[in-house]
């Protein structure tokens, strides 16, 4: 909900705080970057001190950070408070998934539970824009962050009553140095990528990326030698774990990254209000649970790799349709293409998360859940950064070459910065000049939107090929042994499930 409400809030926020294009991207992805960088740390911490405890502590911090974000008075303050939200939010997702892993030991029950959990994400995406649009009709943009507060209060009240506590009975010492290394590695690489996208390749971004990769190598080396590593690297030796992680990141990269464009297209190009655009987006989100339900039902019959392959191909077809969009295509065309994407991605999400979760032993469920969420959050944040940066470069290039004559230097700079800046600039210009500026800006933005759709189509189609070639017929060596859990033997917990992935599961 917090991610989807940002898209509908973006134009109002831009008009009030007037961030630069770089600040706008940081406002969007600072939350996701910090969250992705700390998920492994929080997942491991939950294994050690208790998953319910981490969940409820994070809920308290998330609610407080949401209040600070709602009253941010500058782009810099908003970026900082979004970072605080990311730190707190990192404790929520892995705690919920790891609790599910230990509450449901039966494979079919766990698959159903993970499907419901996945549908919760789609439900939040549905509720976020609708509530956000309603609030923006009557209140300032900061009000959309205050909707997090009652949700967190509800969790704090019901969590102790309904959720069991679980922790690793032999957790060992927490690897503080490993946690710091993982965070620094993620942030340094992402920062270098953003600098390259915004200003071109140079020594500074190259140094950031190189430093991040070096720190990442140190993190992996520490995990191999530490007595109590944060991540069980043996998990990555099996395709049933590493391939789904990559697919999760690719699918989220495309869907979340492209969302940066369709909300602006509805509100700025098509001239819709925040609430009107939220209503038009409702079909897109409502069909995602349909994809989840179909995937959950079909996986036992045709096999999980086949379900994921089909879902990615459906999503790729939707992106191909979006790559043909024009400024006069209309809302029905946009929503129809996005609905096709949502059905496909929903089907992938329902299956891929359960595959990742089932590959790990129960006592490492927190770390495995964190890796699953890290791949998704990292993919989503990277999608916003990369597709947003590519789009910004394409937009600026076209505006520089096609901007109408007669604009002052300040007006031209504002129009080239963002589409919102071009619309605001046009509002203060004479009729003919204003119309010419809007026309050029809309064409430039639609062009960058098509480029983003092409990239998304290539990535999702590539993911489908990867599954078809690397996972469907996989016969991996056995994964790491799982410790016994109530109702299971050690042998059952650690059996190799490659055959189950590669072929349909027998049904009664």
Image (tube, rainbow, N blue to C red):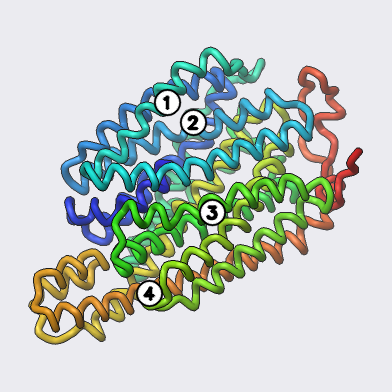
Q: Which residue is mark 3?
A: 252
CA–CA distance in space, label 3 to label 2: 18 Å
Residue 92: mark in rendering: 2
Observer able to see residue 196: no
Q: Is residue 124 left or right of residue 481?
A: left
Label 4, on which residue? 446
In 3D space, how far apart are the residues under numbered discs 4 and 2 (Cα atoms)?
36 Å
Disc 4 secondary structure class: helix
Residue at the far top: name it: 161
What residue is at 41 percent from the left and 72 percent from the top?
Answer: 330
Foreground of the two, 457 or 344: 344
Q: Position of residue 399 (x, y in %)?
A: 26, 79
Determine whether label 1 and label 2 are within 8 Å by CB. yes
Residues 401 and 428: in front is 428
Secondary structure beneath disc 2? loop
**Residue, x 64% and y 20% (percent of image)?**
168
- Tell which tag, 4 or 3, sits nearer the viewer: 4
Q: Residues within 10 Å of mark 2 (few under 14, many from 20)?
A: many
Circle number at residue 187 = none
Is tag 1's residue or tag 2's residue first in the polypeptide sequence?
A: 1
Find residue 59 and name its label: 1
């Amino acid at each position: 909900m917090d991610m989807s409400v940002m898209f509908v809030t973006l134009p109002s926020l831009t008009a009030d705080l007037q961030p630069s294009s770089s600040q706008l991207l940081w406002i969007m992805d600072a939350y996701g970057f910090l969250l992705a960088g700390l998920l492994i740390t929080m997942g491991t911490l939950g294994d050690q001190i208790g998953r319910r405890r981490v969940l409820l502590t994070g809920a308290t911090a998330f609610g407080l950070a949401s209040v600070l974000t709602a009253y941010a008075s500058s782009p810099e303050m908003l970026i900082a408070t979004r970072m605080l939200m990311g730190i707190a939010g990192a404790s929520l997702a892995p705690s919920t998934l790891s609790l599910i892993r230990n509450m449901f030991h039966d494979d079919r029950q766990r698959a159903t539970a993970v499907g419901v959990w996945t549908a919760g994400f789609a439900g939040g995406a549905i509720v976020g824009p609708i509530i956000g649009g309603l609030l923006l009709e009557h209140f300032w943009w900061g009000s959309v962050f205050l909707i997090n507060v009652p949700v967190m209060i509800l969790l704090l009240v019901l969590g102790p009553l309904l959720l069991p506590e679980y922790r690793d009975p032999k957790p060992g010492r927490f690897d503080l140095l490993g946690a710091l290394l993982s965070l620094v590695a993620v942030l340094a690489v992402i920062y270098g990528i953003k600098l390259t996208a915004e200003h071109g390749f140079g020594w500074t971004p190259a140094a950031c990326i190189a430093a991040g990769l070096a720190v990442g190598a140190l993190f992996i080396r520490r995990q191999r030698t530490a007595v109590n590593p944060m991540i069980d690297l043996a998990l990555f030796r099996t395709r049933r774990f590493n391939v789904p992680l990559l697919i999760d990141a690719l699918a989220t990269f495309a869907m979340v990254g492209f969302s940066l464009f369709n909300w602006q297209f509805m509100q700025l190009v098509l001239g819709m209000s925040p609430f009107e655009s939220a209503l038009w987006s409702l079909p897109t989100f409502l069909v995602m649970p349909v994809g989840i339900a179909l995937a959950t039902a079909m996986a036992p019959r045709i096999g999980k790799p086949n379900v994921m392959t089909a879902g990615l191909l459906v999503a790729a077809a939707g992106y191909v349709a979006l790559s043909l969009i024009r400024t006069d295509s209309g809302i029905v065309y946009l929503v129809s293409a996005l609905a096709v994407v949502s059905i496909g991605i929903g089907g992938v999400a329902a299956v891929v998360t359960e595959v990742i979760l089932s590959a790990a032993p129960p006592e490492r469920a927190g770390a495995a859940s964190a890796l699953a969420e890290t791949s998704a959050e990292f993919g989503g944040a990277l999608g916003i950064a990369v597709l947003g940066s590519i789009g910004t470069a394409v937009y600026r290039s076209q505006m520089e070459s096609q901007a109408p004559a007669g604009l002052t230097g300040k007006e031209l700079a504002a129009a080239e910065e963002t589409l919102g800046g071009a619309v605001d600039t046009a509002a203060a210009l004479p009729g003919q000049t204003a119309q010419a500026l809007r026309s050029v800006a809309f064409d430039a933005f639609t062009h960058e939107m098509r480029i983003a759709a092409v990239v998304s189509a290539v990535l999702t189609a590539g993911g489908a090929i990867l599954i078809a070639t690397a996972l469907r017929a996989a016969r991996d060596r056995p994964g790491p042994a799982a410790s016994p859990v109530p109702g299971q033997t050690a042998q059952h917990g650690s059996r190799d499930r490659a055959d189950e992935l590669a072929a349909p599961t027998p049904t009664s």
